Image (cartoon, rainbow, N blue to C red):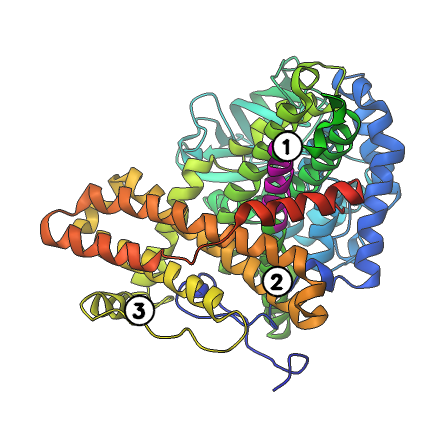
Amino acid sequence: MSASTEKKQALKGAEWLIKESSPFETFIPEDFNEEQQMVKDMCSAFLDAEVLPIIDRIDKLEPGLMPSLIAKAGEQGLLGAAVPEEYGGLGKDFITATLVNEGLGGGFSFSVGVSAHTGIGTLPILYFGNPEQKKKYIPKLASGEWKGSYGLTEPNSGSDALGAKTTARLSADGKHYLLNGQKCWITNGGFADVYTVFAKIDGDKFSAFIVERGFEGFTQGPEEHKMGIKGSSTVQLYFQDCKVPVENLLGEIGKGHVIAFNILNIGRLKLCAAATGGAKRAATITIQYAKTREQFKTPIANFGAIKHKIAEMAIRIWTAESALYRTTKWIDDKEVGLAAEGKPFNEAVLGAAEEYAIECAILKVFGSEMLDFVVDEGVQIHGGNGYSDEYIISKGYRDSRINRIYEGTNEINRLLTVDMILKRAMKGRLDIMGPAMAVSKELMSIPEFGSDGDTPFAKEKKTIRNFKKAILMTAGAAAQKLMMKLESEQEILMDIADMAIETFIAESALLRALKLSDQRGETGAAYELDIMRTWLYDAADRINKSGKDAINAFADGDEQRMMLLGLKRFTKVDSFNSKAARRRIADKLINDNKYPL
């Protein structure tokens, strides 16, 4: 069957751990259609024209500036990409909506404000509101006339969202809920018109409410002074017998956690998209600086040490993008499938996001850490100038740091990654025990030393299969030995999560490179193949280290020795000149004078 006609059913969530994916079913950025590319270009043009020229004014929290920019974005249709047309949106697919997040992701503080508005500020009402609530709020949020915000975090409940202390009780006349409590770190809180606020009815029923600015008993604190994203409004919210009409209860009583956690799944993926957009702009800024900054009578871009850094920035951006749009297409396909089964719009979207919640957690971790790496190396390449406020890379460095904290800290998301995999296995949604037992039997057999086959990229495909075996071996043995105690062994869980993250990113990179090689030939895809092979070569060592740390923490004696030998077998890769590959990658970007947006 030819590449153009080969069809395979999309993998279910986390099935990539136990099944091999075809490069021809994966979706890659090079597959964007003309309309999607136009949307992405429009976002980039909006940042260039409306945001970046006044970024210093934005960071000074000039009154009214951020909400006016969000309104301008709304006038161009950039706020309602994911909103159905019946509510004033564009009704675009999930891929296009994700592209908007990436396209607006290079706008520093503005990106935070607009992402909060379109995500946590709009989606809870869009997905969980009743028809009357949607009709009242969504058109104004989609147009930018009203700005949205979200109140979940409290001073003593961050990652433990269900530990919130804010309460809600029904008024004597039964017409209002009276909210009492405090919310902190509320993005867009200083100017929003509509807030989704979480509180416990009768002290234990965690629920959500739509709160409007101006409701009696609702006040806000002063703007927080933050390390980064200085131009985003961040305040505390206070509720003193705040009167919320009973019709503003969002969703069902006691089901607020369903809203909070489902919105987080989508938010994590879109954070990765925004981080990817921000990283591309930071890389371009750095490449252009390296070409103009001279030391020892030559541009520093000519130095091997600088080329190594530029190449590594590109490798991490490209691999993140590969995993991002692979997952985005899975969610889009699942949404379409659920809609075809008769599911309403909101249930189709949320069901699709839940199916790939594991991948969304992985993307959040990898995307945020990728951006941190890119801006850190960007500052390093700028040298002393990178530490100066006069150079925009310093702003990118400060703004990036928050991404590893919100939408669930990266530690929480690592733990969730493994926890969700194991829970799906116990529920029969994911068969990992069979493959894990097969790997255990393979450890007892004599290793094969024959050829990897004559098919193109056979070695790379085998490398990915072996990475998966390393995960199954380590996770399976840890679960079997520690059983219920495993959930308290967070260091082991995070080691296994790191192995899974590395492998998912590696496979996504391989699939993208294979697809491009099929389309262009190996010569035409030389840049992408260099990136993919460098990532696989380096990932092998990182997976080996995480695996060793996990195994040494729960195994000993003959069991430990056998598993470490198996890990060595599964993470062995051929010698590869990564220096030469990085030189080629960097030279292309330097010649292009940018990282392609």
Q: In which quarter of the image is residue 515?
A: bottom right
Q: Quadrant of residue 107?
A: top right
Q: In which quarter of the image is the N terminus?
A: bottom right
- Neighbour class for label 3 at 10 Å: few (<14), some, many (≥20)? some
- 134 left or right, relative to 484: right
Amino acid carrying label 2: it is Ala
Seen from the viewer's position, the closer of residues 478 and 566 is: 566
- 333 left or right, relative to 291: left
- Secondary structure beneath label 2: helix
Relative image position of residue 33 (x, y in whole percent): 79, 64
- Neighbour class for label 2 at 10 Å: few (<14), some, many (≥20)? many
Instruction: Tell whether position 308 is magenta.
Output: yes
Relative image position of residue 53 (x, y in whole percent): 86, 26
Residue 217 visible, this angle = no
Amino acid carrying label 1: it is Ile
Relative image position of residue 212 (x, y in whole percent): 69, 31
Q: Distance between the residues labelled 1 and 3?
A: 43 Å
Q: Which mark is residue 214?
A: none
Q: Which residue is drawn at 83% across and 36% down?
A: 47
- 260 left or right, relative to 43: left
Amino acid carrying label 3: it is Pro
Q: Which residue is drawn at 32% across and 44% down?
A: 493
Count of labels shown? 3
Residue annotated with mark 1 = 306
Residue annotated with mark 3 = 435
